[in-house]
Structure formats: C-alpha cells, structure tokens
Amino acid sequence: MKKVKVFIPFSSTLNTGDASILLSTINSIKKTFNNNCEIIVASYQAKIANKHYPEVNYMDFKSSIKDKIFKKGKTRIPRNYFILFYQHIFGCFPKFLLRDFENQLLNNIKKADIIIAPGGGYLTDSYYMQFNLALFNYIISFKKKLYFYAQSIGPFWKKTTFKFLKPIFLKANFIIMRDNESIQHLKKLLGKIPSNCEVTADAAFGFCDINKKEKIETKKIGISVRDWDFSNIKKSHKKSIGNYKNNLKKICEFLIEEYNYYITFISTCQGEKEYKDDSILALEIKGMVYEKYKKNITVNREFHRPEELIEIFREFDFFIGTRMHSIIFNFLNLTPCLGIVYEFKTKQLFNRISLGKYTFDMHSENYNLFKSKIKNIIKNRYKIIQKLETEIPKLQELSKKSIEFIKNDYFKSN
C-alpha cells in the first residue's frame, strides 16, 4: 500500500501555541493512517524550528536575494497582490517573483495527496492574506484534497477577500472550525452555511492528557502578554496599548500588596530573536511597577516547547492570559484563567465552557472591572476548577474529532 503524502504548507512553530497545534495534528494524521504516510511541513523558520522540533519533517529550501527584497511589507504586500491577480488570470505563479521557499511550496503541492491548512487564526482580514489566497486557489486548480483544520475564520471586510476566498471555501473538501462565531463569518462570506464544514475545538486540546493532580495553593500566578496593532482596532494603538499596560501594572501591584502573590510573566512567544518576543513587553510592564513590588515579579525569557510550558504552568494558582494558547495550556492543567481578549477567539473559548464572565477587553480603560474579575477568580477558584474538570474533557474529545472528518472524506473517494 503506497504512502499517503500529506503536505502542511505553513506553520509558525516558533510560536509554541502553533507548535502544539502542529504536533497534535501530525500525531492525529499518523494515527489515522497507521504511520503509512509522509508528512512534510513548510515553515519560513524551519532552520531554527528544526532545532526545537527535530521530529518534524520540515521542507528543504535555501534563502536567496529575493528573500531580502520581499521581506519587508513595502515590497512584499504589493508583490503579493500582483501574485494573487496573476494567478487568478493565468492559473500559475510568476516564477520571477517567487522566493525559493515558495517554489518549493508549489512543488510539494503537486506531489501531495492531502493538503492541510493547519489550525490557527490567520484567515482574517486583520492580516494580509493575498499570497495564501493565491496558494489555496492553486491547490484547488490541481484538484488536490484541501482541508482547513480547526480554524478561527474571519472577520472579513476586504473586497478582494470576498472575491477570492469564497470560491476556495466552496471547493475545499472540508472546513473545520474551532469556534461558533467562525460559522457566522463563514455564512456572511458565502451567503449560507455549507455542508462541508463542522465546528470542533482547537487542536492544542489534543496535545496531551489533562492533568488531574490535586490543585494545592502555591501563591504563584502567571501572566502572558502581547502587543497588538492591527487594522481592526478602532482606538489608536498608543492609547489602547497604554490602557493594557497600565491595567497590568496596577493589577500586579494589587495582587502583591493584597495577597502577596509571586508573579511570573511567561508566554508562548519568546526566547527566539527570529520571532516575536513577548518578554520585551513583560519587562516594560515590570519596569512600570513600583520598586517595592518588583522582588515578587519574574520575567521568564526562555524558549519552551509546549510540554515544557504546560509543566511550568502547573505551579500557578491562576493565570491571566493574553495569548490564547497560554490559556489552553493552563486549562489542560485545570487552572482557572482570566482571558484578555484582543480577538473573538478568546471570548469564544470561554463562552464554550460557560466561563465568559472571566474575560476582559485588552484595550479597556476600566481597571476596576479588571480588578473585580480577578478578585472573583480568587474567591471562586475551586468552583472554577470543578467547572474545568467537566468542560475541558469535552473540548478535548471535540478536538480529536477533527481528524475524523478528514479521514472519512479521504477514504470515501479512495
């Protein structure tokens, strides 16, 4: 029996949250096909990521002068728009504009039996999607099996997105989403809810078993932060990020003064100079805190694999999370969390487990509301743990179903 060739055309594995999605997806694929498969993963950061994840079969490519030319948005964005329209008109890519990485992408697409767009939240007009839209259309043109795996989808407001993404979704083999709001964004885009879609849960919930060890108070808490400056923010970035930093500065002082907590800033994006480093913002917030409280605050700046982060998170009484996967990792430890919301995906996650009241708008000026929600978590910590004991296994089971949709669709025609 010949091996099934599976190609995952992009993955940011220097983001530990995305790495947990990728590793969980790879494990599910191998289990489904009884290891009778070849899985290739494409990543711009493959050279560095391979150091942390040697078990992943990354696509080979070499850097060239075009990488430097098209690295910055001033050249990359107009190039990607040109590529999108060129591919739409001629059905192929303009080779003279492609980086070696992108040429290798196209070669692997031609050889693949299955192409999986991995889980995440990149299908939104908050980002520039033009190259990916061209790539998906190319995949469809070759009649390859294309699966969108445990995505958050939308929102969409750009005319080019409505023009080019709609036929891609209609022709894709399956669209798997990780939250209910994505269904509404899909309906707005397509004018209907198609039959080739389902809602499951984030693939990271299937990364490892839930830790049901008794939760003993440690007087330690964790906080993950991130900067956020995209076009769907109505307020000015300077004002909104200022609110965010000030709220976290004051909550650190409050938690140390009132409860004598020890606070660790730690994120799923840190420790690699080639990727975003949330610890830079964490250090800035710690620097804002009154001197007498700083001895209770640590900024962890190291890179950690998902299983390492989950282990570190086990010592926290509760967690204040901006990065969604830092929250998911804590939920796998049945640790209560307050979710700081910058995109709908975080709010949707908490709503699904009936803990929506434990979220807070990233850009809000209302510190008193922020503090009251934290006090509520401290007061109701054990009740929240009981809720998580009931709800997180449900999301874990839903997460495991994602691969079943691919399996059933693939084998019904093979």
Image: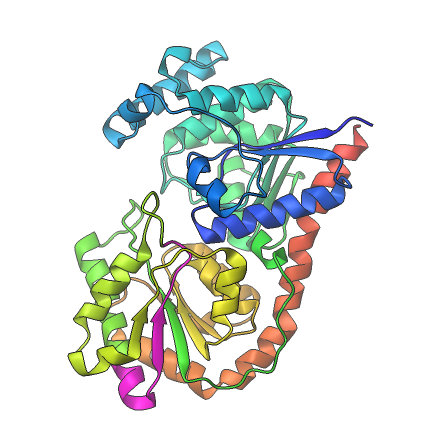
Residue 264, how many percent across, how many down?
Answer: 36, 72
Color scheme of the displayed model: rainbow
Q: Is residue 103 above or below residue 168?
A: above
Task: Indicate left or right for 370 with 124 as reference.
Answer: left
Residue 304, how many percent across, how many down?
Answer: 45, 57
Specify whether residue 264 is painted magenta: yes
Specify whether residue 389 is painted magenta: no
Residue 364, how many percent across, how many down?
Answer: 27, 66
Give me the residue at 35% from left, 45% from top.
275
- Which residue is the extreme one toward the right? 1
Front in this rendered view, residue 49 or 405: 49
Q: Is residue 139 above or below residue 342?
A: above
Give me the residue at 16% from left, 79% from top.
291
Task: Indicate left or right for 142 with 310 as reference.
Answer: right
Asked whether residue 135 appears in the rendered view, the answer is yes
Quarter occupied by residue 204: bottom right
Asked whether residue 369 appears in the rendered view, the answer is no
Give me the residue at 63% from left, 53% from top.
200
Residue 112, how many percent across, how many down?
Answer: 64, 25
Magenta part of the chain: 253-270
Give me the residue at 31% from left, 72% from top.
298
